[in-house]
Image: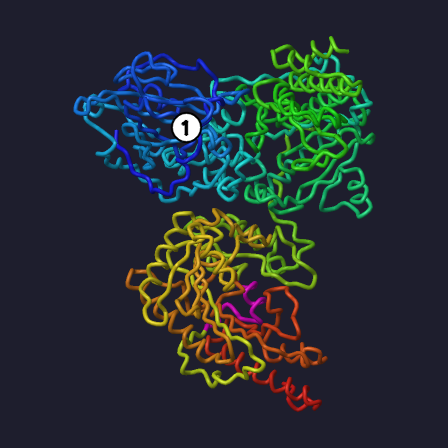
Amino acid sequence: MTFLPLPNDSTFYNLPLKRSQYKENMTDPVIPADQLGQQVLDDVFKSMPPTKRGIAIGIANETPYKWSGMSPYFRSGKPGSNMIPEFVKSKEAALYTATKRCGEATGSVGVLTFFIPEDKKTVAVMFSVPFDRNLYRNWWDAKVYRGEILSWSPMRVKDSSPDAGPVSKLTKKQTATTSPAKATDNKSAPAPPNFPNLSQHNNWMAKCLTPEIYGRLCDKKTPGGFTLDAAIQTGVDNPGHPFIMTVGCVAGDEESYDVFADLFDPVIEKRHGGFKKTDRHKTDLNSANLIGGQLDEKYVLSSRVRTGRSIKNLGLPPHCTRAERRKVESLVTEALDSLDGELKGKYYPLAKMTDAEQEQLIADHFLFDKPVSPLLLASRMARDWPDARGIWHNEKKNFLIWVNEEDHTRVISMEKGGNMRSVFERFCNGLNKVEDAIKAKGYGFMWNEHLGYVLTCPSNLGTGLRGGVHLKIPLLSQKQEFASILEKLRLQKRGVGGVDTAAVGGTYDISNADRLGSSEVEQVQCVVDGVRLLIEMEKCLEAGNPIASLYQELMSGKHARDIADQAGNRGNETKEIDNFPDLSTHNNWMSRCLTKEIYDRLCGLKTLSGYTLDQAIQTGVDNPGHPYIMTVGCVAGDEETYDVFADLFDPVIEGRHNGYSKDALHKTDLNPNNLIGGEDLDDEFVLSCRVRTGRSIRGLTLPPYCTRAERREVEKIVVKALDSLKGDLQGKYYPLNKMTPEEQDQLIEDHFLFDKPVSPLLLSAKMGRDWPDARGIWHNDEKTVLVWVNEEDHTRVISMQKGGNMREVFTRFCKSLKEIENAMKNEGKEFMWNKHLGFVLTCPSNLGTGLRAGVHVKLPSLSKDANFEDVLKKLRLQKRGTGGVDTASTDGTFDVSNLDRLGFSEVELVQKVVDGVKLLVQMEKRLMEGKSIEDLLPK
């Protein structure tokens, strides 16, 4: 066994132990210490996520020392000592299970001892591991004891392999001779280069995914092409909250759960209360098996049962193509059209419903919106919105189906009042009829004996069922025991407004907590019986009576029902469905240039790195734009994108860049000596100057498509180049995920810090993946040169200073770029550039120079003149507020910059800004004097 010293400021090891929070008499049989790592620890730790694990070392002869607190927790000692639950002999070990006062085990504590002949002392090793450290971190402690003195030099064992427990197998030689003072370091197997940084994450994926599992699965694909990285991306991008445990992974098709079983099996086991990979799920949609179901309507305001269903052989929402999504819609709507009687209804496609239909669906609370949750967006649930999505409901409005929301279908049966039996009968009847109609088309729902009904999120496997009621229990909900009552009944609560909403007037949405391992009938029965008991408890409290006896009976294991009783489609379709996006309401350059013919010609092509047309256009499909704001609508995933998909990108570039044709040649000029003037812009009007551009590194894919390993390689290359800069360019790099709070505050104050993207355009382009991994900010000591790493491009380089000396800013800009590229070339790297497009960047709008030269200029009089917009247009300049894109001007101060990027050199564009701003200032002065500017207006 080897030990690695920890820094003295480690806070994890200085937390109090509370002996009273563990159950007594939990000791397992004593086993040989040299088998501890294999027989016990491997099993214990492999069932938990990799996390910090406490190790405490104790030495005998500590009798004079007394633990402070409620009672002693751990001590090495002699046979018969009452200081440890059971004395452990030399070279033997015991495992203890740590639990809350009520509920399941929340961690494990182990003790092993061995005798050191040289010191004639017994050394005891205690290790403690929480199942969920984020929730129960104050239960774990690790301190070192030597003799009678408490030492504050904590130690830990370094994992010997990526998914190993902290204690490796103990050999007889080690037990006889190793002491903590002679610790050496274990070597850990390196993580795969593309393994995500999950150190700050709190979701089941992060707790279960080890480098070993990642390395084993990362190159695999399902038959539909879904990958491990696609499955985990939502959990990587959304670390979660210390007190809210999310799942962190999704399935892209039915085979995901088999191909990536090494990850999904442990996630499922932990999320579903120990449901093992060998367990079988139960399905029962026979409503006649439900006992009771008529609930007191004085307390139950409404009842509802919902589930999801997925159609076999079609990709799930995170991975489906447009054609597959449209196929789902076609199959489901045809099946629904076949329903009659009380299930007869109508389908309302989101993309085609009238305003009146939309308003009615909103009034009925039936309409679902485009996802805005980062978890759903990172899972790619919002692609092509609202294509092939819609709502169907029957004429009585008590049976509702959502199509292509988070699953292929979401089926809901509901009604006001407490007749849960009627709701469940309609639910089962409707599901069975829909499935029969789909089977008639040669399809069926995804289902297997292990997982039950297969859905996108592992949390919904099994039944996918949520049976809920809106329940008025204002008195019971105020009781301290309320949470433990719900936990014992396997129920959960939330506000009637949905997840994360608060209750109003003591009214809660109460539903089943379980999905997998029990049948539909059992889960609805759980709700019926549990709600009945909650109502009986509320009635007791209304009468002024205690509920202690009811509570004690429930906690003793008596069944809730007993306690409550005592208290009171047509044929297989062979027609191919089109995958061309619906762009009928879009206003971006991609939608104007992409024809069906071009799409069909390009949709099967890939760049050398695997980038596709659908990936390039997805941001433009998801974001139709505004009638008066013209966006680009497509992005490049690598340098080859502009060649492989030239039939689309060439007309987009021509439209966006004012007629720049596909045979035009771009000009590059980074010699500041060619700039005329620029050092004398009037400081009374020009407050600051700035020049910025982006650069991409050849041989690495761009941010919408890069792997984690490539993004980290970009950071490594750029930071190494920046570290080589000297003189007025010498500076420091601040990685986003490692900067101190003080550094962050300073960067915010300097207006240097960039945030995680929230723009739907950037999120649809997958710019926010793995944030903040391998992103950072560099600036020189004088704070006049700034480099952003892995924001929207590989790099963004900015030169800036206060005042009107644009020449000095541009000179520094050119010098910085030249020295950075020279340093990279020494390492065999270079920027992406070609004669046609100039410097190649992610967005076609930034091709060419990628340059934006801007000044903050005060034009309070000119900006009110009717000619202002026309003047800017003729000067090829653009304006915005000083706060950035889409911000308004303050006191007539604008950020004025060049409009063009491609077809002009860097010098020419900066020259346009210098000359144009000089003219604008001249006009401002004229107007301030009350004189005409007619003779100054550009022709």
Is 361 on the left-hand or right-hand side of 53? right
Residue 233 covered by magenta stretch:
no
Question: Furthest residue to the left?
Answer: 118
The amino acid at mark 1 is Val
Is residue 251 among the parts visible in the rendering?
A: no
Find disc 1 in the rendering and name its residue: 129
Residue 483 picture quarter: top right
Q: For this view, does 915 lie left or right of residue 345?
A: left
Q: How is the image coloured?
A: rainbow
Observer-nearest of 624 and 418: 418
- From the top left corner, tell me how far across and down residue 24 is, in percent: 46, 15
Residue located 39% across and 14% down the image: 28
Number of disc labels: 1
Location of residue 214 (image quadrant): top left
Are there few (<14), some (14-19), or many (20+) residues within 10 Å of tag 1?
many
Q: Is residue 75 above or below residue 247?
A: above
Quadrant holding the C terminus: bottom right
Q: Position of residue 796 (x, y in %)?
A: 46, 63
Percent position of residue 874, x then y: 62, 80
The quadrant of the rendering that contains the N terminus is top left
Q: Secondary structure at mark 1?
A: strand
Comparing 919 with 120, the one in front is: 120
Residue stretch in magenta: 650-666
State which quadrant residue 724 falls in: bottom left
In this picture, residue 12 sits left or right of residue 803: left
**Place of residue 915 in the rendered image (x, y in percent of width and height, measured from the top left):** 54, 83
Residue 8 can be seen, yes or no = yes
State the residue lying farthest toward the front. Answer: 64
The foreground one among 927 and 410 is 927
Q: Is residue 889 left or right of residue 418?
A: left
* As drawn, 610 above or below 535: below
Q: Is 148 placed above or below 802 here?
A: above
